Amino acid sequence: MEEAAGGAPNPNPNPNAGRARMGQLPAQPPAKGRELFRGQRKESEGSVDFPTVEFEYGDTDSRGAELAELYSYTEEPELSTNRRCFEEEFCPQARGRQWPELDKAQQRAQVLRLLEGLEVVSRERRLRAARAILYLAQGVFGDCESEGDVLHWSRHNSFLLYQLGTFNAFLELLSMEIDNSQACSSALRKPAISLADSTELRVLLSVMYLLVENIRVELETDPPEWKSCRETFRTELSFPMRSDEPFALLLFTMVTKFCSGHAPHFPMKKVLLLLWKVLLFTLGGFETLQTMKVRRREELGLPPLPEDSIQVMRSMRAASPPTCSIELAEQQQKRGHRSRRPLMKQDSLDIYNERDPFKNDETGVDEEEGDEVDGGIEGELDLMERDALLPTIPAQRPPIERVSFPKGLPWAPKVRQKDIEHFLEASRNKFIGFTLGQDTETLIGLPRPIHESVKTLKQHKYISISDIQIKNEEELEKCPMSLGEEEVQETPCEVLYRAMLYNLPQYMIALLKILLAAAPTSKAKTDSINILADVLPEEMPITVLQSMKLGIDVNRHKEIIVKSISALLLLLLKHFKLNHIYQFEYVSQHLVFANCIPLILKFFNQNIMSYITAKNSISVLDYPHCTVHELPELTAESLEGGDNNQFCWRNLFSCINLLRILNKLTKWKHSRTMMLVVFKSAPILKRALKVKQAMMQLYVLKLLKIQTKYLGRQWRKSNMKTMSAIYQKVRHRMNDDWAYGNDIDARPWDFQAEECTLRASIEAFNSRRYDKPQDSEFAPVDNCLQSVLGQRLELPEDFHYSYELWLEREVFSQPIRWEELLRYQ
């Protein structure tokens, strides 16, 4: 992951060169206006003219889109193969009837016959039976007339297959394929891996994915039998039944085995999609998470949440898009002729009687030029400011009504207990000359305004679930004997964390390696992993049309991988944080150690508008459309045109997820915030503000807010529109000096200590709760040699494979120090 750290670019030393490159200044003399317009048109398209994105964030896309993304376009011929395998088994028994015409008992009998075919010795016969079952899970499209019929029968058959034990049967076959050393060694010997190397795995994973996705989705019309079936399936996936680990851990093992190079033929896209949907099914989506959070606060006796964050974000409106590069070029040419004009005071700030700190500064010509000159910074002036700067408009103060501020801020302000303590400490030092530690009740000797301030702070005091968990953990560390053992609820999240704990660093590194390989900004390297094994055909394309189709398929394949990894990482972080804060911190630290922060910044260091509006899809080849409609003749023009959607849902979903992950990793962490500053994330993040979508803009502004105090006064002066957007859209902390921040509250040498202290707390938590020898310090010591030697020692399953190597390294190669042995006799 070292290459991810170099993803954030250095600022261009030449401001004019940087602006010309990104379309702010003309790269040619002004006389060549037409050439300039043509050169800048591509960059300006999708900025000012880009409308508000009508995007509703959710757990997943529509059901049809989620099922379509399971298959690559290269796999399309296999749909007819699955149908043929089913008809070979079904037609002799059906006597001319179709699958929808059978009653339920007859359908069950046919499924049981197919399941018996999975138990034969012949590998080819097992594959044919598995393909026939896959055809059932795909909705017996040969007997359907519309896409709705295909989706209906796919869901109906999925419940039927699960009730007859299909999932467990395929789980056993999947375990066999994972341990198939012959297939792994064969794939390792091949110079190029293609679809043919993962045929069995793709069939098994497709069936399991269809079962999980169809059963996971709840509909009001579901019969009671299906509802109970869904809960049973969720329990089976959440808690280990036959093995000692939940099903998600098996998929995590496949990911690490693939990244280690031992199984390069694993179809990673299908594995990651299935892993994401299993976590979504077992742990719950974002609305379920909000409900769990409300219930947990009630159990802990905490006041209710001030607002529903999901509803607030849905009601927010996107900010104005950045300025067109052509208009900025004109401004740059006329900048020397404009008159100096002070910034207008914002009405919304007047109620606090705050004076604009930059109003009387000597701004001059450099007022809009900061140290940040990367191309995505255009658009710092809103419509009112642009009109004031252009000399063609009469020099008059614009009417105040043009500045449209919301009547109220969207978020209720929050105050932490630590904030009140810091405020009182500073006040006592100023007025009394000494402090009272953590005492927030004694206000003797302080002036009346301080009393009012403390009262206001306490009115907005917010105690999080994490605060309670940290406090309980500190008490358990101090008094392990008197408090006894902690009662831990056996939730799906707790079971998953306990199973992942000892290999969690490897899981995080593997996911980030795949994310790096799938990022559009990554360059192909010889040592990078091959994530295209389950999309490349056996025979490479020979015509231009085939090459275009494969190129679209490869790009789509990478986008789906990014979507699944970003979604499952966000789910893990949010659920672990609710379950216990130190579980969340453990995952976060390993993501940070694996260079997740620069990797995400590298992902956003691209033309984000082009990524969100990318059309890497061929709608006529998408499932289930391709199963019930005749395929039209594909042409280069139809492939280039793509679909008619305004934006790509999965790409915008991925961008928001990655921004949310970055927020999770950096919130209240000074050392990680400094990483954002060091990697020069401000121009990268500001380019993302071009996307006129409220939720995405909110998380970008949050990331800019936490580092504003580190960016310097000149940056703040040059980015006043961004500062205003932060004020309007991001939650406020009452005594947070984010907008000015002349005194930095953490010194660079404190950063490492901060991470080390956090790591020590995490290790103490994991050791206390999950280490097998619980309370080992207080356990009696066995001094009898015979009983100690007679104890059975639990060894790993693979220990006997490396036993001789262990003997050589730990016994034979170690010199025996006889003098030390005699000394203790």
Image (cartoon, rainbow, N blue to C red):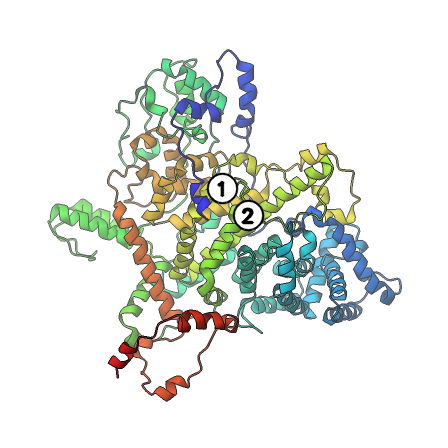
Q: Position of residue 68 (x, y in %)?
A: 67, 49
| Labelled disc at residue 562 | 2
**What's the amino acid at mark 1?**
Phe
On the image, numbered disc 1 is attached to which residue? Answer: 603
For residue 701, side relative to residue 225 (left or right) = left
> Residue at 57% of width from left, 55% of height from top?
272
Q: Nearer the viewer, residue 534 or 529?
A: 529
Quadrant in the picture for residue 489: bottom left
Dot 1 alpha-carbon crowd within 10 angstroms: few under 14, some 14 to 19, many 20 or more: many
**What's the amino acid at mark 2?**
Val
Q: Secondary structure at mark 1?
A: helix
Which quadrant holds the C terminus? Answer: bottom left
| Residue 397 seen in the figure | yes
As drawn, 803 above or below 524: below
As drawn, which residue projects farthest toward the top? 31
Real-space CA distance between mark 2 and mark 1, rounded to the nearest whole angstrom: 10 Å
As drawn, 628 above or below 722: below
For residue 453, side relative to residue 205 (left or right) = left
Q: Nearer the viewer, residue 76 or 412?
A: 76
Q: Nearer the viewer, residue 344 or 651?
A: 651
Quadrant in the picture for residue 330: top left
> Residue at 31% of width from left, 39% of height from top?
710
Counting residues from the start of the chain, the first of labels 2 and 1 encountered is: 2
- Is there CB contact under 8 Å for labels 2 and 1? yes
> Residue at 76% of width from left, 57% of height from top?
82
For residue 442, side relative to residue 83 (left or right) = left
